[in-house]
Image: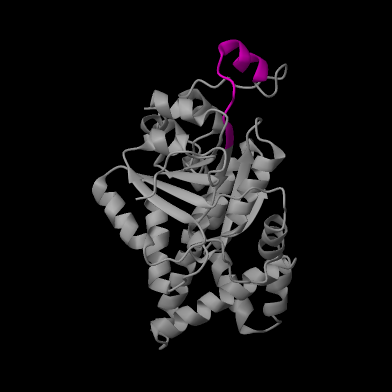
C-alpha cells in the first residue's frame, strides 16, 4: 500500500478527505452509470458557468492542483468497502484509503476536505494532533449549518476583528501561526452527475490561490458562486434542499400522467427533459414570467393548469417551504455543539 506520509518537497500535492460517505456514494454511482475516466472530466452541458470557468481554471499555470487523494474513514470495514467502490474508476489521481489515521492523513495533505456529519465536527477535528497538522493548510468544509467561526473555535483559532481583519496579530501573540485557511462550501446531490450548484464562502485568511483551487475543485462537478456568510443558510436551502422539492413536483406530475394512461417511465423521461429545458432557458437569461407568458397562450390549456396551481396556493406554499427550510438550516450547526 502506498505510504500516506509526506506532503512537502517533491511529494505530490495531496487532498485529504475526512468523512468519506459522499465519496463512497459517488464511487458507487460512477460504477452503476459506467462514467469511467478522470475524476475531473465533465460532460459539456451548455451551462456557461460550468465549462468556461473550469476550463479557465484548468489552464491557469499558477494553480497547483492535487494529484493524490487520501480518503479517511472510521473503520476497517468502511475502508474495505470504499476501496472496492473506487476500484472500478479510472483516475489520473493516486487514491489512498485509510481508517483511523486522521492526524497522519491531514499531516500528509496540502488541502483537507471536511465531509463528516455536522455533529461529528468536534470528534473529527478535536484531536490535538489533527489541529497541529492543520496549521497553515487549506480546510474546505461542506458541513451543513456549521459556520467558519464554529470551526475556528474547535482548534482555538482567533476570530478576526476590524482592527485585525486577518487575525494575524492575535494569532502571533497566542503562538498559533500559521493560521488555517477555511472555506465553507455547499454542493448538492447533482454533483453525482456533475451538475451541482455549489456556493462557497472563503474565510478571511484565504489567499486568491486558495480560492482559485476551491473554485477549480467544485467547477469540476458543476457551477460555483461566492456568497456572503449571512446568505449561507438560505443558499443551503435554495441549492441543497430544492432538488428534493423539484423531485416532489416531478413525482406529482408522474402520478397525474399515470392516471391519464402514460407509463411512468415514459412520463419521467418527458417531465425530466422538459424541466431541464426550462432550466436551460432560465440560465440563458429568460425570466420565469417570460417563460410562463410564452407557454400560456390565450384560451389555451396551459393557463388552465396554472390557474389551478394558483387556486391551490402553490406559489405561497413553495415560498413558505423555502423559508421553513432556511430556518431549519440555521440551527443545524448549533446541534453539533450539544
Q: Is residue 157 above or below residue 24?
A: above
Percent x, y for residue 31?
Answer: 39, 69
Q: Residue at x 47, y 44 (%)?
A: 16
Q: Nearer the viewer, residue 304 or 98?
A: 98
* Magenta segment: 168-182
The residue at 51%/60% (across/down) is: 191
210 above or below 68?
Answer: above
Q: x, y (%) of residue 65?
A: 60, 50
Residue at the extreme bottom of the image, as rendered: 261
| Percent of width and height locating residue 243 | 50, 60
Residue 288 visible from this viewpoint: no
Is 200 placed above or below 286 here? above
Q: Is residue 174 magenta?
A: yes
- 204 or 253: which is nearer to us? 204
Q: Is residue 148 magenta?
A: no
109 and 29: which is toward the camera:
109
Q: Is residue 75 above or below residue 128?
A: below
Q: Residue at x 52, y 57 (%)?
A: 242
In which quadrant is the C terminus drawn? top left
Q: Where is residue 245 shown, x and y percent of the image?
A: 49, 60
Residue 99: quarter of image? top left
Direction front: furthest residue: 10
Q: Quadrant of residue 3?
A: top left
Q: Is residue 223 visible?
A: yes
Question: Residue farthest to the left?
Answer: 77
Which residue is at the front of the view, 82 or 92?
Answer: 92
Q: Residue at x 25, y 47 (%)?
A: 76
Count the marks: 0
Question: What's the colour scheme?
Answer: one colour
Amino acid at each position: 500500500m502506498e505510504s500516506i506520509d509526506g506532503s512537502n518537497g517533491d511529494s505530490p500535492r495531496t487532498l485529504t478527505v475526512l468523512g468519506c460517505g459522499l465519496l463512497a456514494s459517488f464511487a458507487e454511482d460512477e460504477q452503476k452509470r459506467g462514467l469511467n475516466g478522470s475524476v475531473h472530466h465533465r460532460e459539456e452541458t451548455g451551462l456557461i458557468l460550468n465549462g468556461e470557468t473550469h476550463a479557465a481554471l484548468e489552464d491557469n499555470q499558477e494553480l497547483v492542483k492535487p494529484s493524490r487523494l487520501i480518503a479517511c474513514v472510521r473503520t476497517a470495514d468502511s475502508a474495505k468497502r470504499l476501496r472496492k467502490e473506487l476500484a472500478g474508476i479510472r483516475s489520473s489521481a493516486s487514491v489512498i484509503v485509510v481508517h483511523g489515521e486522521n492526524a497522519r492523513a491531514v499531516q500528509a495533505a496540502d488541502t483537507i476536505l471536511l465531509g463528516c456529519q455536522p455533529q461529528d465536527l468536534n470528534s473529527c477535528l478535536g484531536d490535538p494532533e489533527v489541529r497541529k497538522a492543520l496549521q497553515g493548510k487549506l480546510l474546505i468544509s461542506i458541513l451543513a449549518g456549521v459556520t467558519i467561526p464554529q470551526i475556528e473555535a474547535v482548534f482555538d483559532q482567533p476570530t478576526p476583528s476590524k482592527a485585525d481583519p486577518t487575525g494575524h496579530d492575535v494569532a502571533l501573540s497566542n503562538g498559533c501561526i500559521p493560521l488555517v485557511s477555511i472555506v465553507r462550501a455547499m454542493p448538492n446531490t447533482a454533483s453525482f452527475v456533475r451538475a451541482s450548484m455549489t456556493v462557497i464562502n472563503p474565510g478571511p485568511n484565504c489567499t486568491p490561490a486558495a480560492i482559485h483551487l476551491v473554485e477549480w475543485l467544485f467547477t469540476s462537478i458543476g457551477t460555483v458562486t461566492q456568497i456572503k456568510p449571512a446568505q449561507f443558510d438560505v443558499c443551503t436551502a435554495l441549492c441543497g434542499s430544492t432538488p428534493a422539492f423539484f423531485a416532489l413536483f416531478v413525482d406529482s406530475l408522474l402520478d397525474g400522467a399515470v392516471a391519464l394512461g402514460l407509463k411512468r417511465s415514459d412520463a419521467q423521461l418527458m417531465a425530466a427533459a422538459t424541466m431541464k429545458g426550462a432550466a436551460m432557458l432560465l440560465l440563458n437569461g429568460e425570466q420565469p414570467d417570460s417563460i410562463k407568458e410564452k407557454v400560456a397562450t390565450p384560451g389555451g390549456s396551459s393557463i388552465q393548469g396554472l390557474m389551478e396551481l394558483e387556486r391551490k396556493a402553490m406559489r405561497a406554499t413553495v415560498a413558505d417551504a423555502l423559508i421553513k427550510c432556511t430556518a431549519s438550516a440555521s440551527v443545524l450547526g448549533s446541534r453539533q455543539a450539544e
